[in-house]
Image (spheres, helix red, strand yellow):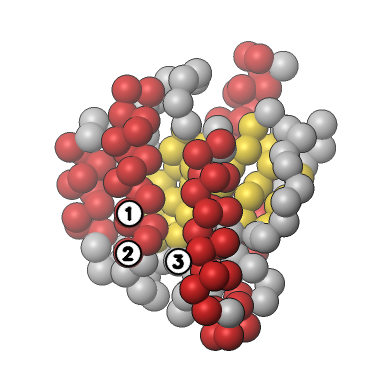
Amino acid sequence: MAYQYIESPSEVESLNKETIFLIGGISDCTNWQQQIKELLSVNDRLTVINPRRKDFSDFKGSSGYKESETQIKWEFDRIKRATQLLFWFGNETIQPISLFHFGSALERNKKYFDKITGGQQIFIGIEPNYKRSFDLHIQIKLFGYTSIVSDNIEQLTSHVNSYNKNLEMFFG
């Protein structure tokens, strides 16, 4: 297999066994997804799924509820099917939808944390100046999640690449 990249609203399905969905701010946030895409492109066994559309500002400004509903359903379906979730809480905005997805993922996957097989592997990145950083760190501990929480994108993607390299070593 080879590295794959899927961006909303693409209907192309993943060909790789491992898929990672990027969850974090889009509206009023920098395009952090582009940096993640580049840093994960060294990973041949991974499909990166990005909900940020190239035309996102046009999409949000003119499309109304029907297109928003399509986007939300697209994200929901792909989050559910992803084998890995990457959360990035940048400091530009609070990102309530990302927080919603984060809480859901912690609850859904709590029995699988820190195991090589099982539910979705969760990778967490929180910029130091993120307004709800303290709350997230407390919630993460309360759920018993003991993996590393990264404070920058380079460290976060390094963890993703190492994890997937280990999967390849153990499972081919």
Q: Position of residue 4 (x, y in %)?
A: 76, 45
- In contact (CB < 8 Å): disc 2 and disc 1: yes
Q: Nearer the viewer, mark 2 or mark 3?
A: 2
SS label for mark 1: helix
Q: Residue type at mark 1: give it.
A: Phe
Q: Which mark is residue 100?
A: 1
> Which residue is the site of mark 2?
96
Q: Residues within 10 Å of mark 2 (few under 14, many from 20)?
A: few
Quadrant hosting residue 161 = top right
Q: Which mark is residue 25?
A: 3
Between disc 3 and disc 1, whose residue precedes?
3
Q: Residues within 10 Å of mark 3 (few under 14, many from 20)?
A: many
Q: Residue type at mark 3: give it.
A: Gly
Q: Quadrant of the N terminus?
A: top right
SS label for mark 3: loop
Q: Is residue 162 above or below residue 100?
A: above
Q: Position of residue 104 (x, y in %)?
A: 33, 43
Q: Residue type at mark 2: give it.
A: Pro
The residue that appears at 25% across and 52% down in the rendered structure is 136
